[in-house]
Image (spheres, rainbow, N blue to C red):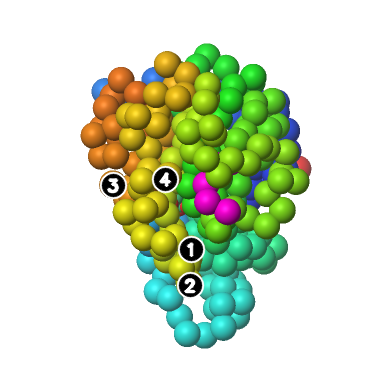
Amino acid sequence: MSLRQRHLLGIEPLAPDEITALLDLAERYVVLNRSGRKHTDVLAGLTQINMFFEPSTRTQASFELAGQRLGADVLTMQVAQSSVRKGETLIDTALTLNAMHPDLLVVRHPSSGAVNLLAEKVTCAVLNAGDGRHEHPTQALLDALTIRRAKGRLHRLTVAICGDIAHSRVARSNLILLNRMESRVRLVGPATLMPAGAADLGCEIFEDMRAGLAGADVVMMLRLQKERMDGGFVPSMREYYHRFGLDAEKLARAHPDAIVMHPGPMNRGVEIDGLLADDIRRSVIQEQVEMGVAVRMAAMELLADNLRAARAG
Ligand code: ASP
């Protein structure tokens, strides 16, 4: 079991066998995390630094727990937004941190590509915890694990990814992963929230949510990313909920066993009905959070193996 890359910067470079291997390893961590003794020494002696240039609740907590359960020394830095030009700040920060000899660096940044840039400057393994609209690989992997556990497979599924596609790194990483694992992806949302060139991404596009959900096995809702919008992308929250908010009536168009997902944080009553989000017969939103810790443990173990092999060689 190994990853061919030194870093986990996106789903794009991962082959299907690497995705499967990582999810298989994560299954073992699901068992450990449900046990009374959640500790291993897989990362003992290694230092993990988490740098979040953008606010985060679940991803940050999940990476912290993952590192601690694997026995690493874990430090989380809240990097305040600076008025200094981003490229400069980032490289300075990277070099400063590198001098402290971290082994794993977990980075979230509002600019697409910033984490890749940083990875070129440091000698440790870098994990992308979300960069702008680009990628959020551990989110797509935890979503894949959740889907695989619910549906028993990752191929030949119809997955409807709905809402604010244009601003979503979650949508991008999931689209790449699900295509690679041979599932069919539908992007559902208003034209104003579809990325340019969406039709070339190997998926179907729907502006009518009911049509987009018809027969879907998985309904993945996305947060309306108001912080990445600088204009009127939607007429009003009320209108948006009416057309694109997931409620029981719209969900009835999907497969009767369809699962409902959301990466969080949720805008209840905007992209999803609060009661539906909490309905454990349909919603796997809490399971997604649980799978997040296991997937991050697996990813860090595989990158640490590569690091040790490189150092030994
Ligand atoms: N938590 C996810 C992300 O960081 C989704 C979201 O923020 O809407 O991309």
- Answer yes or no: do the residues labelled 2 and 3 have beta carbons within 8 Å? no
Q: Position of residue 38 (x, y in %)?
A: 33, 29
Quarter-wise, where is residue 123 in the image?
Answer: bottom right
- Answer yes or no: do the residues labelled 4 and 2 have beta carbons within 8 Å? no
Q: Give the residue pinned by disc 4.
A: 243
Quarter-wise, where is residue 244 in the image?
Answer: top left
Which of marks 3 and 2 precedes in the sequence? 2
Which of marks 3 and 4 precedes in the sequence? 4
Q: Give the residue pinned by disc 2.
A: 230
Tag nearer the camera, 1 or 4 = 4
Which residue is at a point 23% across and 34% down the rendered structure image? 275
Q: CA distance from mark 4 to mark 2?
A: 21 Å
Q: CA distance from mark 2 to mark 3?
A: 22 Å
Residue 64 vs residue 39, the one in the foreground: 64
Q: Which residues are magenta?
A: 187-191
Q: Residues within 10 Å of mark 2 (few under 14, many from 20)?
A: few
Secondary structure under the numbered disc 1 in the rendered image? loop
- Answer yes or no: do the residues labelled 1 and 3 have beta carbons within 8 Å? no
Q: Is residue 134 visible?
A: yes
